[in-house]
Image (cartoon, helix red, strand yellow):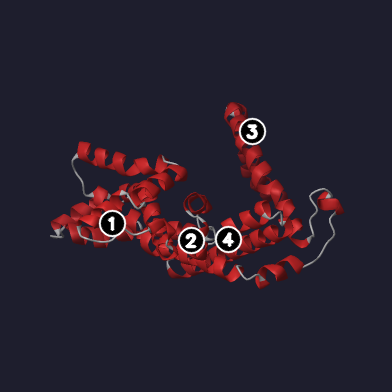
Amino acid sequence: MQAAKTKQRSRPKSREAGSTRAALRRDWDLYLMLLVPFCLLVLFKYVPIGGLIMAFQDYDIFGGFLESPMVGMKNFQELFAAREFLSVLWNTLCISWYKILFFFPVPILVALMLNEIKCGWYKRTVQTIIYMPHFLSWVVVAGLTFDMLSSTGAVNRLLALFGVTPLNFLMDASKFQPIVVLSAIWKEAGYSAIVYLAAISAIDPSLYEAAVMDGAGKLKQMLYITLPGIVPTIVMMLLLRIGTVMDGNVEQIMAMYNPTVYETGDVIGTFIYRMGLGNMRYSFAAAAGLFNSVVSFTQVFFSNMASKKLVHRSLW
């Protein structure tokens, strides 16, 4: 009797294994194509993790990992004692949370408005226009920003029409963070709306038909059908955004900042770059990078736990 039960349990497993082997034989070329990106992922994402040992060494570029002496937590002590560290950490958090506060809702609003456009050609035209800035590099966006905000740029010319003295936007540290946030909104808000448009398209159309029959207008349909329908997507995107809080979008910052705005523009990523490659303090920079990664993971972990309890949605 027991043997019969064991045999019955093994049949589904054997069938599953057989179907897997059949799929591999049938689609071997597709699986072979996945081998290249998998190898690149391992090579550039997982292999470099071994370099974290540098954070606990007094790394010598000529001696390498094997001959560099271990110094324990010395690099972290120097990092936390560094005069610039608290300023850099504060700038990183400010820029990232400003982006969450002001940037994150914009793609949702854009998607909601695009969803209400019924004229096909007009909708496609608007989408094309607002998606295009995403495909510009941050170097190009920085160049456009410099041209517009320079002393003879379009913004100062417009202000001059109202009798306002030209402002030196690019050399004023107090204006750097708003410029970073606004340029990020201009570049990425339209393209980021694609995710929410896809979520909206998955909502059951019969819900809108029932709402119309009950006399609900466009605003109520949006508030009580569309927004609740995309809440899981909003939560997922918010969790992913929180995971990049310590990133600060280094590419954007490096393309736009200059020594006169270090006070408010220097973030952890640029700090690591200057310490590691500029000052050749490799172990110190590795310690800063490891601290950055640990804090980012902790933020995602606890945000994921909160999301699971509050809205029953999570990344894992």
**Among numbered discs 4 and 1, the one appearing first in the sequence:** 1
- Say what amino acid the circle numbered 2 marks: Val
Horizontal placement of 209 versus 84: left or right?
left
- The percent coordinates of residue 197 (x first, y second) are 33, 48
Question: Gap in Å between the C-alphas at discs 4 and 3?
Answer: 48 Å
**Among numbered discs 4 and 3, the one appearing first in the sequence:** 3
Q: Which residue is mark 1?
A: 226
Looking at the rendered image, the disc whose residue lies closer to the viewer, 1 or 2, is 2
Q: 133 or 171, which lies in front?
A: 171
- Say what amino acid the circle numbered 1 marks: Thr
Horizontal placement of 281 versus 104: left or right?
right
Q: Which residue: 70% across, 52% down?
A: 49
Q: 192 or 37, which lies in front?
A: 192
Question: Gap in Å between the C-alphas at discs 3 and 2?
Answer: 59 Å
Is residue 257 depicted above or below 85 in this figure? above
- Say what amino acid the circle numbered 3 marks: Arg
Say few, some or many: other residues with alpha carbon within 10 Å of mark 1 (under 14 / 14 to 19 / 20 or more): many
